[in-house]
Amino acid sequence: MTDLSNARWFKSSKSPNADTCVEVAFLDTDLVGVRDSKDPTGPALVFDGLQWDRFIAGVRASRHRRG
């Protein structure tokens, strides 16, 4: 299990002030944490760098759409 206690979480500057955002933390171990801002002490998903890069590439190519 990855220790996220010292992670520095952030959200997009385009996100509203409400707690309805996804927060991301780039970790020292080439891992990326993702969590729901409504539940900052709740669970987080952790991806390795390659998984994160592929996800971001998919978002940029519009492959991940709400539907």
Image: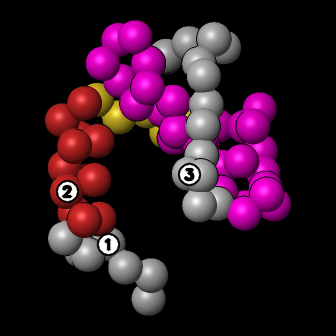
Q: Earlier in the sequence, mark 1 or mark 2?
A: 2
- The kind of residue on which mark 3 rests is Ser
- Measuring 40% from the left and 30% from the top, which residue is drawn there? 32
Residue 61 lies in quadrant: bottom left
Secondary structure of residue under mark 1: loop
What residue did someone put label 2 on? 57
x and y percent of residue 2 in the render?
A: 49, 16
Q: Identify the element where label 2 is drawn.
A: helix
User: Can residue 35 be seen in the rendering of this structure?
Assistant: yes
Q: Which mark is residue 64?
A: 1
Residue linked to disc 3:
12
Q: Is residue 63 magenta?
A: no
Colour basis = secondary structure
* Cα separation between marks 1 and 3: 18 Å
Q: Earlier in the sequence, mark 1 or mark 3?
A: 3
Magenta region: which residues?
A: 16-43
